[in-house]
Image (cartoon, rainbow, N blue to C red):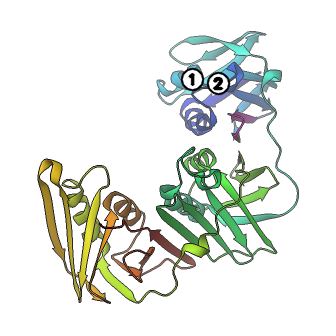
Amino acid sequence: MKFNASSAQLSRELSIAANAISPKAIMPVLEDFLFTLEGNNLTISATNLETSIVLETEVTGHEDGSVAISAKILLDTLRTLPEQPITIETIDDNSLLITSSFGKYKMGIDDSDDFPEIEPVPDGESVSVDSTVLRHAIEKTMIAVGEVGVVRSSMSGVLFQLDFNKANFVSTDSHRLVKFTYNGLNFDSTKSFVLPQKGLSLLKNALPENVEVNIYWNDNSAFFEFNGFKIISTLINDDFPNYNNVIPVDNQNILNINRKDLMNSLKRLLIYANKSFNLVTFNLAEDSITLATEDPEFAHDATEQLPCKYSGEPLTMGFSAKFFVELLSIMEGDEVNIEFSNPKTPVLIKPVEEEENQDLLLLIMPLILQ
């Protein structure tokens, strides 16, 4: 194998592919990139057996071939080189040579036949989604993905729910829930699957702006294809909770408030809150809200009042300010509506203004006050 390439371009592409490599690989070859050269087309593959990435890039090819190369050594070399043409070639069965304007670098290689076979994209049904929308969906829902080993397995990923003319992306850790809906699809049936956090992170880091992403699936894996990239992720084989059961529909109490004012206020109160629960109370009356927290162990307390519009019963509710801030941070726009029926039921947070074809719904469970 022998080809010429731009050091900077190859470094950028390998940096994306490296996200599929586990820092604790169970086999030495899983620490490698697989390079396959055919003509001027270089295919780069990386996998941790749960998530994989395959990308194609154009180089100047001289001799076709395939080789497994240490990802760390190759990336560390390229990242320290300024932009310049480089040559990469195998010089015998056990070595690869990188030639730059500064010098030559020889490294050992592994047998490409030992690299695991990556599952091909299946035939059959697929759906196309704009990459910018998909990345927004992942960024917003990942905040509420549950921790592996703490929640049921399906809650450690994001539900992709494809439903004729829309897609729902849903996550929950039992304390909060995020549902992002995109209404711009044209799909002939319904399908749902749960993508784990590793797959979500790999996809988010690879997605460019404003390109079409084709999504395929089978019983075990989901496949995302765009701009010469293929990302494959195993699915979580567990039913996602029926999230509609916890979304309240009869909410007589509605608080309208500036999102950034509320978020910044909660951040300040977090400084004084007990670090075990991060409890902040919301004291609500007609067009009035008072936020308060305390940590008796250290004699800390803080109180703030904010302008708002509130229609509902006077009451007091408690929340984890940390969770509330994280939810507000994934929203856009100036104002939010906060809706609920009583201090013990789930609370909905909705942006007042939405992007076209997009709907965002956030839910947080209140803390029960003594």
**Measured along the vertical axis of the image, is residue 368 above or below residue 309?**
above
Residue 289 shown left or right of residue 246 in the figure = left
Residue 178 or 129: which is nearer the viewer? 178
Q: Earlier in the sequence, mark 2 or mark 1?
A: 2
How would you classify the magenta stretch by its main secondary structure? strand
| Residue 215 x/y as whole percent | 73, 59
> As shown in the figure, which amino acid type bears the numbered disc 2?
Glu
- In the image, residue 101 sits, relative to residue 278, either above or below, namely above
Where, by quadrant of the figure, is residue 226 drawn? bottom right
Residue at image position (55%, 26%) is: 75
Please say if the residues under marks 2 and 1 sit with CB atoms less than 8 Å apart. Answer: yes
Left or right for 146, reference 333: right
Q: Position of residue 118 (x, y in %)?
A: 79, 37
The span from disc 2 to disc 1 (Cα, nearest Å) is 8 Å
Labelled disc at residue 133: none
Magenta-highlighted residues: 42-55
Q: Which label is found at residue 72?
A: 1
Q: Residue at x 79, y 30 (%)?
A: 116
Q: Quadrant of residue 185?
A: bottom right
